Image: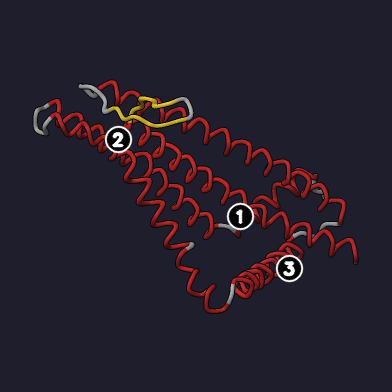
Amino acid sequence: MHKKTQYDLYKSFLDFVATDIQFERRLVNRRMFSVLLWCFFLPVMISMVVLILVKLHIFPRSAKNYLDWIVLIFPVFYSLYVLSSEVLAQVPLALKRGGIATTLEHAGREGAWRERVSDSMGRTFGMDSQDWGWIISSFKMDLEAMQHRTRYLTALAGAVFFLLMQGIDTLVDGEEKMVWVKSSLGWIETSSNHFSQFVGLALFLVLLYLSGSQIHGSLWRYLNCAELVARRSLSQ
């Protein structure tokens, strides 16, 4: 019988992870789509529609003054929704039982999940500790490369989004609203439009990076399970 190579074993391990993570992957993909929809596509599309309606003299020219708020309001409301649904919703339980008890309860659920996945890995793959060491090292390298790719995509998305905002500014007629900001060098003249644009851009990039980091964290859990199986096979 032909013995599987280390690449074949690693490919089987990746197939196992992909099969087991189907539900969580759909949930994460849905969240990534929500971030792109609410923080990128909707602000850009609505801004373009407003500009077209102004060019067609359907909207007054003063409507262009609200374009920066259109870009800002969607990331802000989506951030508040995520914060309230995932963080603030846990505050009453933490106040009732205590922060440590809530954290330990979450750790208990993670432990039960690791036991299930580790047992399933052990039954699926009949490998020794050396083969598990190869899989763990390879998977760790791929996860590090994935994290670097998330940072690169975040920087690239920031550059693209910034250029889109600059393109929208070039279509806006009239003078920008200027405000005076006090600093150590005195009073500096700055644009309030630019401030709202950078706030919206920062919120979008933070949400995009956190979504990519969540995918990385989900896959890192399977790396921990593989390490547990490797230790179990080493002790046997």
Q: Quadrant of residue 69?
A: top left
The residue beneath circle 1 is 218
Residue 79 pos. (x, y %): 41, 51
- Residue at image coords 9%, 28%: 57
Q: Nearer the viewer, residue 170 or 95?
A: 95
Q: Nearer the viewer, residue 146 or 170?
A: 170
Cα separation between marks 2 and 1: 35 Å
Residue nearest the viewer, comparing 232 with 78: 78
Q: Is residue 94 above or below residue 191?
A: below
Q: Amino acid at mark 1?
A: Ser
Q: How is this picture coloured?
A: secondary structure
Judged from the image, the secondary structure of the residue bearing numbered disc 1 is helix
**Quarter of the figure with residue 204:** top left
Mark 2 or 3, which is nearer the eye?
Answer: 2
Residue 46 on image: x %, y % = 25, 38
Task: Say what secondary structure mark 3 lies in.
Answer: helix
Residue furthest to the left in view is 57
Taking 13 as reference, is 109 above or below it? Answer: below
Give the residue at mark 3: 119
